[in-house]
Amino acid sequence: MPASPTRADRDAPESRTPLRSIDFLILLMLARSGDRHGYGIMQDVAEHTSGSIELEAGSLYRTIRRLQDDRLLEESNRRPAADADDERRRYYRLTPFGKRVVAAEAARLRRLVRIAESARILAPEPAR
Amino acid sequence: MTEFVRTKPRGMHERVYRALLRLYPSDFRQEFGDAMTEFFHDRLTRARAAHPIVAPLLLWPHVLLDFARNALPARFDSLFRAVRRLRKKVAAARTPTIRDSRRKDWMLTTVLQDMRYAARGLTSKPAFSAIVLATLTLGIGATVAIFSVVNGILLRPLPYSEPRRLMLIEHMDPYGTVSEPEFADYRSQARSLEKIAAIAYSSANLTGGDEEPERVRAARVSDGFFQILGVPTQVGRYFTTDEDKPGAATVIILSYGLWQRRYAADSSIIGKDVVINGTPRTVVGVMPSRFDYPSSSIDMWVPLRLNYDSLWTRNNHYLTVIARRAPNVTFASSIAELNAIGRNWTREYPDTYFPGKPLQVKAAEFEDALVGKSKPYLFALLGAVAFVLLIACVNVANLLLARGEGRRKELAVRTALGASRVRIARQVLTESALYALVGGTLGVLLAWQGVRFLVAMAPSTIPRLADVSVDLPVLLFSLVLSLGTGFLFGLVPALKAAPDSSSETLKESGKAGGQQGRGITRLRRVLVVAEIALATITLSAAGLMLRSFANVQSVDLGFRPENILTMRVSLPARQYPGDRAVQLYQSVLDRVRGIAGVRSAATVGELPVRDGWSSWSILIDGAPMASVAASPAAMPMQVSPGFFETMGIQLARGRVFTDADRNGAPNVVIVNETMEKKLWPGKSAIGGTVKMLNPTSPWATVVGVVKDVREGGFLVEPPPAMYFPHAQSGLSAYYWPTDMNLVIRTQGDPLSIVSAVRRIIRELEPAAPLARIQTMDDVVAASVSSRLFSTQLLAGFAVLALLLAGIGIYGVISYGVTQRRFEIGLRIALGAQRGGVLRLIVGEGVRLAAVGLAIGIAGAFAVTRSMRALFVGVGSGDPRTLLAVIVAIGIVAMLASWLPARRATVVDPIGAMRAE
């Protein structure tokens, strides 16, 4: 039987991977574009999945609440210029821990892609 | 409560969206409500860019789907979050070592803790628990018992292979069943049917061995019958195709019941001969016990052996036809094909089919044919029992609320010590779940006994009774039902259990007062009103069923069934050719009339109410035959002299039969009033003549007209009927029957003379079996047994509902009296009359009942409307029934509030006020 995780284990970013794909997408978008509000996240996700994933408010905010509880993202106080703003919007950003988890997940995926490439399932792409 | 919306909604869409947001838990709403509204607003704006009206509308399906997917889960999220927070709090209070070792079992520990706590509550208040458990056991037990019946009869698939492809084929009136040439045509022409088979009924004398001769019922079945149903034999094999050919070796297949009863379940019976009607027949198979098609009273199956080269006439409809549709053929398309075949006949045989009454197929899916009639009764019962369960839930919720009141201080202390509302709600829910599971277990035990009782009490006319049992699906249903019940009655107390403000409660002196206490009292009243409404609906339905039953029974059958013994005697046909049977029956009757206590005795071919009838084509008043299609039809019956007197059938005009109406004397006939009205409209039938549609039958003269007898039972209009003297029936009514029913009117108990009659028949013809020994009262009762049975059950449930509602009223009023002791004491001290106090309290109960009644009567209209098919001679809004229901509820409400009110009037004012 594996030993129960210690506090140190729990806080290691690898302990949170693999991430659910939707969690990863949201975190990734935040990592890319900094502070975003819910609708912006939805647009980013839709854009980067060629519109195949269009988040609805309920799913999005439930996920946000969960990620918040997991200390992966937090509400940001920084707002863009006041006229583009609406006080009802909430802005989110990654926590430092969230950044490390996204990185860990991306690294994990890269390792998997490497395996796929070496098994000739996927043609290796030249590094850009 | 702070509301999340800080600005006004912008337009209709947003307003609806905000309303829907209430589906989310309040903490979620407060955190994200505005952001979600904004999100929605952004989507709306973008959509409007595409099309100002249509595009926003197209948004809604996505939005609604999103709500469906997330609103409820978000509630669970909130619950888990709360639990997690609490867990952190608890963990923080503990030393690190304990916390680490306990962390994993935390969930389990609190559940166990709750369970322990609940169990302690259960046992520490045995009287309270006993009442709660008894209520739940009754409610769940009754529901599970009725569900078992519904499951066995309606839900469980029929025991045939691919039952959905099976159908029963008959014809609409006046053709009824199917004739031989019609069957042959269907068999050769219908492409939509994979296989088709015909069934005819007969009975036979089974003799041989040391056993008594026995009258057995046989189904004569054509080739393919067993293959269509696809149930394998217990032992042996099906009939072969060759065995269905005329002149083939005579073979039979035994029913499981006959095999057990007469042959001691001996498998070596296969290949042996048994003697049927004096002829040896070889047993080739035995069917298993669950196979009882076409009826559970069938003892054996024999090949029909139709001779397709010389079939009986086309107008002789007597075959029941079953078929298996070809794969992928729908029921409707199959009927369309059969109807098309029928239309050809109408064209080809205009002599046979009534002009203007084309032949119409009346087919039914197998399941409908077997259990369709029971459906409305069963659903009515299930509905009634569900109402009883709901009322039981309300009562238990009320009890828990009342106890919750008593525990408010305890819970307030717990809250003050750090228990969250969720934690307390969960504990109360655990308690109700425990009650529900214990009640459910007891309920299943009750249902298990109840089902045995129901099956034993149920009349055999209810189909598939053998399939009724408490099985795995029923147990699963019970589990879900119990948990659902626990949730239902536990939810309200759970939500109300945790005090809004613990300090407030702690400050209260514990007497009536405080916002919370008043809210709960109001809630309990609402619950009582709800259960009175439910009881009103159940009572109305039961009342209408009772009135229907009374209406059915008040129908005049046309004879007096009391004090009549009946039995069927079957003479071995070969030994009684011609009118020898008549002579034997005459000697039987002569000697039966000599038994002490017998007033009169007679014989009849088909017993009214029980045996049913078939109509035969006839000619009247010497007119030659135009065509079969144009001929009238009536039901022929062979009776002995004394039949009308014995049965108590009244003579309207003319005379009854005498011994002089013997073979060789002028042929005579007696007709009923319906036949007279139909065939001799406006004049007397006496002197008219009747001839069966048969070249050899003589014309018989009508000598009497008798009152109508309801041959098919209470609810079937009497058919045109004609009675021939048994002695002449060989000529005037086709044949001299060897099977007759004795009807014997006695002075005392009809069953007391059975052995004397049996002895007489043994002496005169030892080979003649006696069957169906019944009083005529029993015959009549059996014809309405299903209706009586369901009416009784429904009435039982209604009484239970009324009783539970009464207990509910009692509980609330009684609790109110306890709470208001001070106020009542004060009133009395200030000079209020005790009668006035009584009126005050009873008035409160009656007011609750009145509100419940008003709602219930509206509900009763709606519910009983859907049961209209079950009612006879009474509409769903029958004022007399409603009045009776109002009176019943009123009396119960008054009684239930009078008992506690009386307690109030003896309040000692000084004591009551000092106690505060």
Image: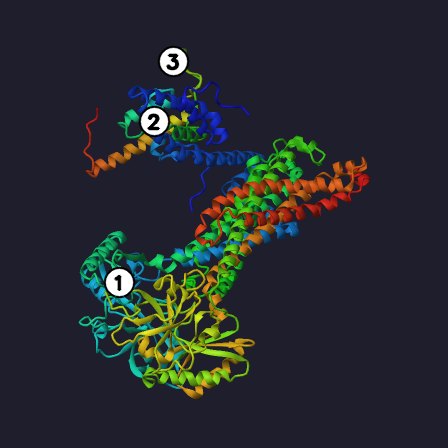
The answer, for residue B758, to whether it is visible in the render is yes
Judge by depth and name the residue closer to the eye, B603 or B232.
Answer: B603
Judge by depth and name the residue closer to the eye, B563 or B308.
Answer: B563
Q: Which residue is mark 3?
A: A84
Chain on which label 1 sits: B
Helix, strand or loop at label 3? It is helix
Are the residues under badges 2 and 3 in a single subunit? Answer: no
Judge by depth and name the residue closer to the eye, B247 or B384.
Answer: B247
The residue mark sitting in front, 3 or 1, is: 1
Question: Could you tell whether B218 is left or right of B824 in the image?
Answer: left
Percent position of residue B834, x then y: 77, 42
At label 1, the amino acid type is Ala
Comes first in the chain, label 1 or label 2: 2
Percent position of residue B610, x then y: 42, 68
Helix, strand or loop at label 2? It is helix
At label 2, the amino acid type is Leu
CA distance separating discs 1 and 2 = 65 Å
CA distance separating discs 3 and 1 = 92 Å
